[in-house]
Image (cartoon, rainbow, N blue to C red):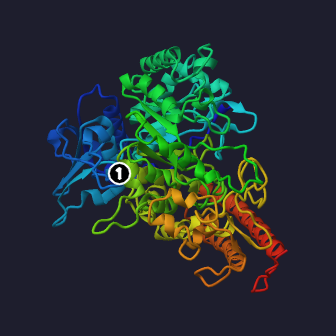
Amino acid sequence: MTAENVVDPPHSAWLPDAAFAAVGRRRVCVVGPPQDEVLATVRLEAARATAAHGGAVVAPDASPDLLLTLSPDATSVLTSSSKGPHGDHLGTLDAADVGGFRLERTGGRVTVSAASGTALLHGWFHVVRLGDAAFAAGPGDDVDEGHAPAATLRVLDHWDNVDVHPVMGQVERGYAGGSIFYDAGRVREDLSRVTAYARLLAAVGLDRVCLNNVNVHAREARLLTDDLPEVARLAAALRPYGVRTHLAVSFASPMTLGGLPTADPLDDDVRAWWRAAADRAWAAVPDFGGFVVKADSEGQPGPFAYGRDHADGANLLAEAVAPHGGVVHWRAFVYDHRQDWRDRSTDRARAAHDHFAPLDGRFAENVVVQVKHGPLDFQTREPVSPVLAAMPRTRLSLELQVTQEYTGQQRHVCYLGPWWSEILRFRPWGEGEGDDGPTVADLTASGGGFAAVSNVGDDRFWTGHPLAQANLYAFGRLAWDPALDAAGVLDEWVSLTFAGDDGSVDPRVRAGLHAVMDDSWRTYESYTAPLGVGFMVRPGHHYGPDVDGYEYTPWGTYHFADRDGIGVDRTRATGTGYTGQYPAPWRDVYESPETCPDELLLFFHHVPWTHVLRSGVTVAQHVYDTHFAGVERVRRTAATWESLAGLVPDDVDARVRERLAEQLRSATEWRDQLNTYVLRKSGVPDARGRTVY
């Protein structure tokens, strides 16, 4: 049996039929022109829900309980103004631009109006999310609300390969099976699962997808040329739910695809080639979104080969896509991956700022510089990247990683919403006098928005671990509204995903899932790399502990552990100077071990094993205590999940049990390797006398 003949339908994730009970029991009316493709989807959704739950689709004059209407006058919805680093307002966008909608409720009857089909679809799913509460009819329950996303650009990047890569497989850093787009070196014949995926994304407010890996191999490069008709098929499968298509492209395409002798961004023939390529892309896919580029990073070609810089390279593509309203996402993940571990002045963390901050103001308006949330590579704990505060005249996008490359690879439960909320709410200039300084969310939502690496594959549960679905859900919701509470977002996901026949969730299930997931990121952190150290993982696949695995490789040196201490000196006074890339007050907070937050201490400082943390224990003892405690928390997590037997679907129960067993095994291995490493390096015993090998 081939992948094209999969029998079992994919898991319904957060859109089971039961989640539509509240709207499905009511009379629903959809008003708007029949030719609008996404509006037709709204009609289909309404018909599906009412047929399942006994309601009806009715005409406008039949007193509908829920009226969904396409109205070009629905312009009262504005995004919150976002402020730049100096308090300047970078502009607002109206409902038609960003997908906002208006919700009015009078006497228990609800009207949702929007200026576009996609915005109205988002309004429909908002009502679904609210359930019966949307139709509250008591005194004081009438409302007139505007809802709009914080950013126009909310993109999921798929690291999918058309061909199966000999090292990285079909989905690079994919932990949920093969690609939902590609199979056996071609686009799948049956794209119904792609449309089901678009439905999941629309329900959380995501409306853009990049279809292929940023490491563009020879086969994937042809998506821009020979395979454009197949890209058009994928776009057609996504379009009914308002999801637009982007492509990752190779900077060397004029040579590898066009036969030119150069890819120099200032060469006229190269510029003409990219203009023609963009024209063909939009001719094939009229709502095409634009290009994503990884250049001069980890072996990918870029403008450095021609003595040019990243602004030259990005502006080349920006010129090509500008006539079509396209966007170029140019990734700032650029560093030397052929370092000498002996050279302690080399610091991978500095690289993005060193490369990009001097170019502020030189990028075209339709270029978005896409910046990883931290200076390294999606580690379990990193400081926020200083690049996000260093380029006030450039559109910046915050890049997150939903796929759990360094956070358990969807074999460990690790809800990342709390970590992302910390990042989004971080204030690079601290608290302002009389007014709060801008947050990371303010800086990025106002220009480049949010991007993340997707975590789905062709696994029945989409994400391998059923509970990893919550991370995809949380990214969509936080990209729409970065101010949302991460625990509240998790509760939304639970309410939808585990809804019973009447649309409600068993309180025992709700409480159990919060117990398992609320602090799961911190639990994962507790038994893995401590106090801001990164990359203590097995090289290559990045799963499981290998304390010195990367320490003597060209990829960087990350902890410098010896008999006297551990950590990287990134201070201005005696280290790599990385702290100087931050504005005040953080440049000074991070400079001193006395003021640096403990959770980042070893990222910024090399300290003795006997250095006393604010908790009152030494660094060595902290490792022992947290790693023993982390394993015990995983044991309690498994016991909590077992208590839900019979209350959750059997297939979900079985998969989660299997993953929790692996998590406990892996956490135990992490505990024993880290504790033994610290004991052997430091000679400091565990004060509690527990077994350390």
**Please, is residue 402 above or below residue 513 in the view?**
above
- Residue 169 as seen in the image, left or right of residue 691: left
**Please, is residue 602 above or below residue 265 in the view?**
below
**Please, is residue 504 above or below residue 371 in the view?**
below
**Front residue of 628 and 660:** 628
- Residue 634 as seen in the image, left or right of residue 223: right
The residue sitting at 44% across, 66% down in the picture is: 585
* Residue farthest toward the front in the current orientation of the protein: 573
**Front residue of 610 and 649:** 610
User: Can you give x and y, in whole percent of width and height, for residue 221 in the image?
Assistant: 60, 24
**Front residue of 653 and 427:** 427
| Tally of numbered discs | 1
For label 1, the crowd category at 10 Å Cα-Cα, with few meaning under 14, some 14 to 19 and many 20 or more, is: many
**Please, is residue 240 above or below residue 140 in the view?**
above
The quarter of the image holding the C terminus is bottom right
Residue wearing tag 1 = 128
- Residue 600 as seen in the image, left or right of residue 60: right
Label 1 residue SS: helix
- Residue 500 as seen in the image, left or right of residue 624: left
User: Can you give x and y, in whole percent of width and height, for residue 611 in the image?
Assistant: 67, 79
Q: Quadrant of residue 59?
A: top left
The quarter of the image holding the N terminus is top right
Tell me, yes or no, if residue 64 can be seen here: yes
User: Can you give x and y, in whole percent of width and height, for residue 328 in the image?
Assistant: 46, 33
Tell me, yes or no, if residue 509 can be seen here: no
Give the residue type at disc 1. Answer: Val
User: Can you give x and y, in whole percent of width and height, for residue 564 in the image?
Assistant: 77, 73
